[in-house]
Image: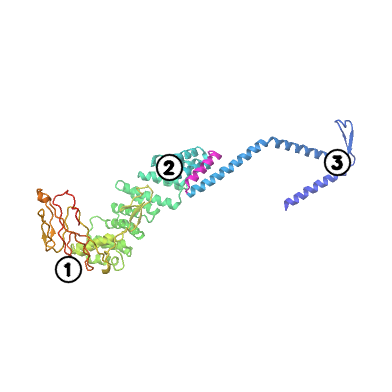
Amino acid sequence: MVRVLIYLIILAALAFGLAQIADLPGALSIKWPWSPLYGKTIEVAPIVGLTIVLAGFFAFYLIVVLLRFILRIPSIMSFTARARRQNKGVAAVSRGMIAAGAGDARAAERASREALKLLGPTPLALLLQAQSAQLAGNRQSAEQAFKQMTENPETRVIGLRGLYLEARRAGNDQAAHAHAQEAHSIAALPWAGQAILEKHTMSEDWRGALSVVEANIARKAIDKDTGNRQRAVLKTAIALEIADREPDEALQLSREAIKLAPGLVPAYAVAGKMLARKGDIRRGARVLESGWKAAPHPDIAAAYLDLRPGDSQADRLARAQTLARINSGHIESRLMLARTALETRAFALARKTIEPLIADGNRPTVRTCLFMADLEQTENGPSGHMREWLARATRAPRDPMWLADGLASDTWAPASPVTGRLDAFVWETPAERLSAPEAPFKFDDEEIPQFIPTLPPKGELIEIAGQPPHEEAVPVPGDKPAAPANPPEVAPANPASPASPQANAVTTPEPTPPAAAPASQAALDSASPATAVPATPADIPPAKPILKKAIAGQPDDPGPR
């Protein structure tokens, strides 16, 4: 609204000025200085003269603009070509990024070459080149693109990150640490700070790692809760390292760790041990009891029971009962109290304490089953109940343990030994393993398969069940072999006996049609083929003796089997 009023005021002023000029008396005399009107005087009104002057200026302005446009035609054409080339390059980068995100390595590589051709070594083109090279597995091309990006201040950080990742993939930890250190000096980047931190943790330089964490907190590279947790873990690691040399500093660091992370179990254990070493049993007990209330753990229980060295088993049992009352419903409380009762040979108390864990409907864990086996052996000696609990332990669910990056450990560590990640160990139950069914599979009576015995290997003899042993018969040349009254068993030939012409003679049994197996024949045991299967004489068809050559290496009998 204000602008409209201003425009109206300006127009009113111009109209008023033109009206004043038009009302001026007299005339404007112009003496023409050029031929063909040389010396001629032209008289016009003032308003007409002003209009002529304005028209002349406007015409002059049009001529200047036209001349400038004509002179700028080459540059305009060049700018248009560059703009068209720029648009094609940006479109190629877009296609390449979409292809890289979709995992199409060939399309991403084609788009990368087109973008480099149209745009040159610009940041986007170099980034696309690196992405397509990584997707295609061309590490050398990717490193070259990232190195070119480090030469530009705007893309230096992303180039260093790319070089860091490539060095990690190649296993060059020293080069990766150098790139991360350089990037961390430029800006407070979380990935660079984490990389430097992992370098210190892999070398177990806990004080250096603590300084890095404090720097990350000061530069706001990590949030406050994560920083406090990492500081607590590192202070606990330092306390564990110097506990034997500097117990006072270890105690101070463990207390600071408890304040920073109230649920950190190792910090409670270290603080309780250091206080007990100084002789302050009461304060050490209070620290461990607070830790047991927050997170019951076997390490805290062990430190609590060993607060006063030299205590009797009765004193240890009383202390265990005190600790168990703090968190009576937890499984660790029952296992700790039952184990202490077993050591004191209070078998009734041990069974009463562990009974809810083995009641019907519950699946006792491995530690529970092993404890029951120890209880049965200690109270009753080796027995069937002990062996039963040991067998159940092989199929029982596993107990919680320290897990980090797929690695299971019985003791806590500040960082993962696999990746160097700080605070990687967590106390949790590992996944259960697949196991065989507890009961063997049984066939129904009508589903028992009829197993057919196969012929033995060459050089072995078939044993016919229910028949008396029969020695190998050596026939006289020219006589026909007679079938014996009873089917004999074939005795193995003695390969050590000397060869003789008669030993080389082999009788050829007459062909006998195979007898069909009776329907009532029982299944043979496939697990023990040498076991004779009982059968009635009516079930076994008459058969002629089966003879084998006594001398190994002779060709098989070409006659009918």
Q: Earlier in the sequence, mark 2 or mark 3?
A: 3
Q: What's the residue at 89%, 31% (across, down)?
A: 39
SS assignment at label 2: helix
Q: Is residue 123 visible?
A: no
Q: What's the residue at 10%, 57% (across, down)?
A: 471
Look at the numbered discs 3 and 1 and tell me whether their residues touch, using CB distance below 8 Å: no
Q: Quadrant of residue 200?
A: top left
Q: Amino acid at mark 1?
A: Ala
Q: Amino acid at mark 3?
A: Val
Q: Quadrant of the C terminus?
A: bottom left
Look at the numbered discs 1 and 2 and tell me whether their residues touch, using CB distance below 8 Å: no
Q: Earlier in the sequence, mark 1 or mark 2?
A: 2
Residue 315, horizontal then vertical, whole percent: 24, 60
Q: Find disc 3 in the rendering and name its residue.
A: 48
Q: Find disc 2 in the rendering and name its residue.
A: 166
Look at the numbered discs 2 and 3 and tell me whether their residues touch, using CB distance below 8 Å: no
Q: Nearer the viewer, mark 3 or mark 1?
A: 1
Q: From which residue to which does the magenta span run?
A: 103-123
Residue 519, horizontal then vertical, whole percent: 23, 68
Distance between the alpha carbons at the discs numbered 3 and 1: 147 Å
Q: Crowding at label 1, few (<14), some or many (≥20) Cα neighbours within 10 Å?
A: few
Residue 70 is one of the magenta-drawn residues: no
Q: Quadrant of residue 338?
A: bottom left
SS assignment at label 1: helix
Q: Find disc 1 in the rendering and name its residue.
A: 538
Residue 71 to residue 347: above or below: above
Specify the principal SS of the magenta part.
helix
